[in-house]
Image: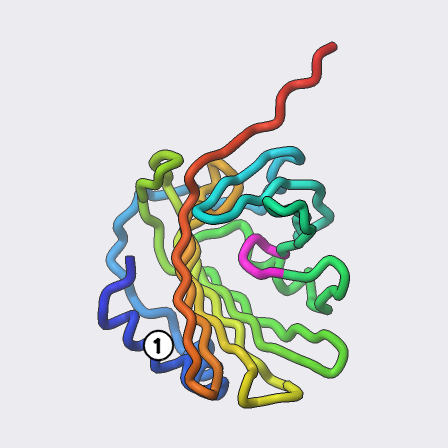
Amino acid sequence: MLSRRRQFVCSFALITGVAAVAAAQAPATPRTKRGPALPPAPFVQPEIGTVYRYEGFSNRITGGNGLTTMYADQRNQGGARFGVFFNDNITDRLAYSEDTLATLFPLSVGKRVEFGVSRGDLAWLFVARVVDTETIRTPAGTFDTYVVETIEAPKRTRSPATARTRISTYWYAPSVRNVVRLMSITTTQAAQKQLRRVQLIGIDRPRAKAR
């Protein structure tokens, strides 16, 4: 859990896209290491058929290609993520540099990546940095995790007043190839704010096929 001071700093940075970009370009804030010394974690696709159950929703892994992982949610609606930490739309894909994102892996404390993303006439700045390791307890179990902070800030938008900036913290567990806890704050220039916190409550692994 972030300290009250860090939550305030993150909330303030979300007021405008300019502030968020400045925060993204700043050096990582030093943190006291709370978790174990983890080996570098390469990107590994979750096994197809695995269901990750979170508070309020679930993701069933349906496929993977490069750094992109496809899934279906509890309503069987498809979605995608690239590089674990960024959402995509399988019907209206974002354009991004997979080679640039790949430099974030294998995960290790201090790694950082920044890249532009576009869709048509829209554009965003995406930043991810590995700030710590931490052992956390969830309803699904106890996990050794990498703590990854991300910023998604609009660079070119049709409606600046409703453009969203999101700062998120992910706890990624290499042992299960996925995020086991998430906290994010999404804010618009109109000062609308949404706080989201979820954690993993269970994993359903695919059954072995009978021979």
Asked whether residue 62 appears in the rendered view, the answer is yes
Residue 9 picture location, percent across and down? 31, 77
In the drawing, does residue 7 fall left or right of residue 158?
left
Residue 48 picture location, percent across and down? 66, 35
For image coordinates 53% across by 30% down, the residue present is 204
**Residue tagged by mark 1?**
11
**Residue 54 or 157: which is nearer the viewer?**
54
Magenta stretch bounds: 82-87
**Residue 168 or 73: which is nearer the viewer?**
73
Residue 31 picture location, percent across and down? 28, 62
For image coordinates 74% across by 10% down, the residue present is 211
For mark 1, give the secondary structure: helix
Q: Is residue 116 magenta?
A: no
**Residue 67 or 62: which is nearer the viewer?**
62
In the drawing, does residue 94 fall left or right of residue 202?
right
Asked whether residue 110 appears in the rendered view, the answer is no
Residue 21 picture location, percent across and down? 48, 82
